[in-house]
Amino acid sequence: MIKNDLFLRALRGEEVSRPPVWMMRQAGRYLPEFMALKEKYDFFTRCRTPELAAEITVQPIRIVKPDAAILFSDILVIPQAMNIDVEMKPGVGPWVPKPIRSAADVEQVIVPDIDETLGYVMDAIRLTKEMLNNEVPLIGFAGSPWTILCYAVEGKGSKSFDTAKSFCFSQPEAAHVLLQKITDTTIAYLKEKVKTGVDAVQIFDSWGGMLSPEDYHTFSWPYINQIVEALEPMTEVIVFGKGCWFALDTMAKSKASALGVDWTCSPEIARNLTGGNITLQGNFDPSRLFTPIPELKKMVHTMIDRFGKDKYVVNLGHGILPTVPVDHAKAFIEAVKEYEGK
Amino acid sequence: MIKNDLFLRALRGEEVSRPPVWMMRQAGRYLPEFMALKEKYDFFTRCRTPELAAEITVQPIRIVKPDAAILFSDILVIPQAMNIDVEMKPGVGPWVPKPIRSAADVEQVIVPDIDETLGYVMDAIRLTKEMLNNEVPLIGFAGSPWTILCYAVEGKGSKSFDTAKSFCFSQPEAAHVLLQKITDTTIAYLKEKVKTGVDAVQIFDSWGGMLSPEDYHTFSWPYINQIVEALEPMTEVIVFGKGCWFALDTMAKSKASALGVDWTCSPEIARNLTGGNITLQGNFDPSRLFTPIPELKKMVHTMIDRFGKDKYVVNLGHGILPTVPVDHAKAFIEAVKEYEGK
């Protein structure tokens, strides 16, 4: 089976000699090898070409050697498949030419056939699994329905997604129809990914932390939970809600295998809010990778001591920054491996 | 003295018939009367011309009738006075042509004479106090040193201020020198504002929530606390740290009169974290002002019930959005006034 199964064992809550480690957005951005491919192929070409996606996925496994791979893709392939145009504008980020602003717009959104629209992702998974040769597990992922709605309605990235929120608060019925369509698509998509070979899935609720606890429990969590319930019988599910410390108690009562935590929530508070029994993942501040290496490694060891080595997956608290020196990224991973036997 | 002193009484923890209300960034943005002035005068002209700043400050007092006025100004007048060029680019926001990136850059930053550099703010205060005619108190404000550093180093607004954070984490000594210079300037500036006539001051730590609790207690809180300690003998001090729920317990032990809370922290958790004795201010999600008016008013009443009517100042959890209809802004204020006698 999988030779290094530390990651899966930690998700199942089994005792380990050291916690596993991977980094959010480890596939891409900070690696010169990735930048070379970026020069030649635009963003969605890299997502849609199985050979490129697979190559980008395994690059960090060769170079920085984490304990799990995460498929190179994007959360916005889902709205694309649902008949919502999404472009990636260099220097700007995601761009939706016709954002959704009304019930009529929501009606135009489809729940697509996954094979027809996202078959290229399954091809990338098959190729990646071959290349990984069972060395480490492969993680598949999707955005949370709320986070996808944010882009589909706002039309672009934003500091606070006020347009998306105003849409939900002034037209809640239309918002819920859209959220359910995204949920149905995401469930079918992730199930297909698991059947094709991913060993675990992560749901990214990047913008859940923009909501009040009440609104989070209205517009985000119920849809995430539908996905968790649908996928849990098939695979391990990680839920990462950036800024969602206020919902950790609810999340801990769900069927998720693990919960992601960002760096504003201390290990002690995260353990306390989640009751101490569920696996946690996180939460090194990505900017803290700029810390001089000896101090950086000490900080990683302190973080492990504070979370505890079991029921814990070492990770960043959000995506790695493109400007991080590769030797600092390597030091982060090495520090975790050096923890063994400490 | 001041005819409507509800706001000051709430800050002092006195019993009130209903909580006072004001809105962050109520001076400007969403009012057509403000937009008319914006057409004619650029941002810093409005800040620097006492007649304009005073007029913009009192506009909401006439139109939406909150219980306190806040001087129209900007947190970035401080770096400007410190020899750091800051422009306001339409459609972009704050722009620092020569951002601070090294110890040598920090050396060029001065602690200025307040009268020479920021006398125009004092003129605006004098004029505003005349125009307010003791109807309601006037709030003065400043950014937290950390938040000012964010702009001075990043050079512009940002979702995560990674450049500013990397600077602090890789060159902490230079960062602390800069933070102390900003702190010294801010203390002198706020003292002068109080002497000139403001009735309370608020410190905005807009970007404190980008830091881990440890880093917050290293790079933000100690400097805010210096300001609190320096100003507390003269006036009431409110500290608002957006996203800083994790530091509310520390803040509650300081000499601040009140703490601002954003909408991701529920009233119950905010009261619990702060021990129940300090006045809290907040925390309506600014996007929630788009809710239909009858439901909006109910939500305001529920919020007051949850915080409790005493030791509480009704406010938004961050600045009002420019796109909010004026009648919704008015309904927010009215709902608080209608709470009386409920």
Image (cartoon, coloured by chain):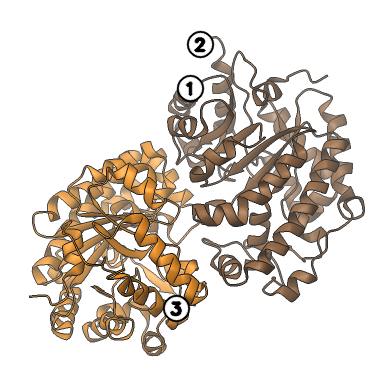
Chain colours: A brown, B orange
**Residue at the far top in the pictured view:** A341
Can marks 1 and 3 be said to lie on one chain? no
Q: Nearer the viewer, mark 2 or mark 3?
A: 3
Q: Secondary structure at mark 2?
A: loop
In this figure, which residue is indicated by the disc labeled 3? B328
For residue A301, the mark is 1
Q: Nearer the viewer, residue A306 or A223?
A: A223
**Chain letter, disc 1 residue:** A
Tag 2 or tag 1, which sits nearer the N-term? 1
Q: Residues within 10 Å of mark 3 (few under 14, many from 20)?
A: many
Q: Secondary structure at mark 3?
A: helix
The image position of residue A78, as x and y in percent, is: 77, 55
Which subunit holds the residue at mark 2? A
- For the residue marked with disc 1, what is the amino acid? His
Residue farthest along the right direction in this orientation? A116
The x and y percentages for residue B305 are: 35, 59
Residue that numbered label 2 is attached to: A342
Three-letter amino acid code at disc 2?
A: Lys
Q: Are marks 1 and 2 in contact (CB under 8 Å)?
A: yes
Relative side of B296 to A15, left or right? left
Occupied quadrant, residue A68: top right
Task: Identify the residue shown where x is 78% and y is 22%.
Answer: A135
Q: Amino acid at mark 3?
A: His
Up-down relation of residue A150 to residue B27 (above or below):
above
